[in-house]
């Protein structure tokens, strides 16, 4: 599968049990993701990478609690507990994730005023991360995605990739969800509508 990239989304300590924004069962997917890495033309890891004053943190909005919604200039935004702060242990990859085979680590969410769920665009759906250019230059046309969380960063990455014209498969068995107010069902529906292949669900 030389023209296929494995994109591993945000398998970081803060999204695993014991972390600041723990996704239930987030650590269970690590062995399966490691086993998959040998099969691809490229392995790419994404890393949520926020400054402490990031606008997606409830702590930076007096009177607001985690998981409340706010309106940002680019649209609605969930407020999260502080997570994946640049340089913190929580922002590190899960210790068992095999990072050695990775050709590229792409960081996102580093601009204080805007969140970035997708590996391709920030939450304004316009500011690029640079991943599309990298994939194009390496002629990687097919993408397989796994990681955390199914309904946020995996979902946004998969839908953006499909819109950009990639052939996209999401390995649901190697993803885990946050599932806020039906967000998982909405994400599955949205990915299906966008033409993303959903496997292993
Ligand atoms: C994520 C919420 C906030 C994710 C990142 O990786 O799905 N979710 N930041
Ligand atoms: Zn984040």
Image: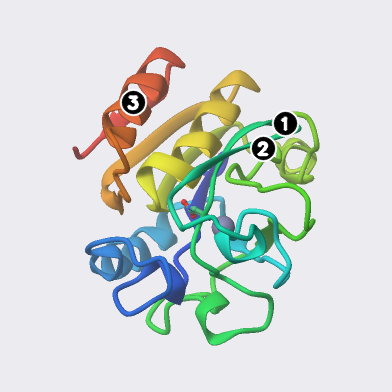
The image quarter in which residue 124 lies: top right
Cα distance between the residues tagged 1 and 3: 20 Å
Disc 2 residue: CB within 8 Å of ligand 1 = no
Cα distance between the residues tagged 2 and 3: 17 Å
- Is residue 44 visible from the viewing direction of this image? no
Q: Which residue is mark 2?
A: 123
In what quadrant does ligand 2 lie? bottom right
| Badge 2 density bin: few <14, some 14–19, many ≥20, Cα 10 Å | many
As helix, strand or loop, the secondary structure at mark 3 comes to: helix
Cα distance between the residues tagged 2 and 1: 7 Å
Q: Where 26 sits versus 181, above or below? A: below
Dot label at residue 186: 3
Query: Nearer the N terminus, badge 2 or badge 3?
Result: 2
Q: Position of residue 149 (x, y in %)?
A: 39, 51
Query: Nearer the N terminus, badge 1 or badge 3?
Result: 1
Q: Which residue is mark 1?
A: 74
As helix, strand or loop, the secondary structure at mark 1 comes to: loop
- Is residue 26 visible from the viewing direction of this image? yes
Disc 3 residue: CB within 8 Å of ligand 1 = no
Q: Position of residue 172 (x, y in %)?
A: 27, 42
């Amino acid at each position: 599968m030389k023209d296929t990239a494995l994109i591993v989304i945000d398998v970081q300590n803060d999204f695993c049990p014991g972390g600041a924004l723990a996704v239930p069962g987030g650590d269970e997917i690590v062995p399966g993701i490691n086993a998959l890495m040998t099969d691809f033309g490229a392995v790419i890891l994404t890393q949520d990478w926020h400054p402490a004053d990031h606008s997606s943190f409830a702590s930076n909005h007096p009177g607001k609690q985690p998981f409340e919604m706010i309106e940002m200039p680019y649209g609605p935004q969930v407020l999260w507990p502080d997570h994946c702060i640049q340089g913190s242990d929580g922002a590190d990859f899960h210790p068992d994730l095999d990072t050695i085979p990775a050709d590229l680590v792409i960081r996102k969410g580093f601009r204080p005023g805007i969140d970035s769920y997708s590996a391709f665009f920030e939450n304004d759906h316009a500011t690029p991360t640079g991943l599309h250019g990298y994939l194009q230059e390496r002629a990687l046309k097919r993408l397989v995605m796994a990681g955390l969380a199914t309904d946020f960063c995996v979902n946004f990455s998969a839908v953006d990739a499909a819109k950009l014209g990639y052939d996209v498969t999401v390995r649901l068995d190697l993803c885990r969800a946050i599932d806020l107010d039906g967000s998982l069902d909405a994400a599955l529906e949205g990915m299906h509508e966008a033409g993303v292949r959903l496997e292993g669900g």
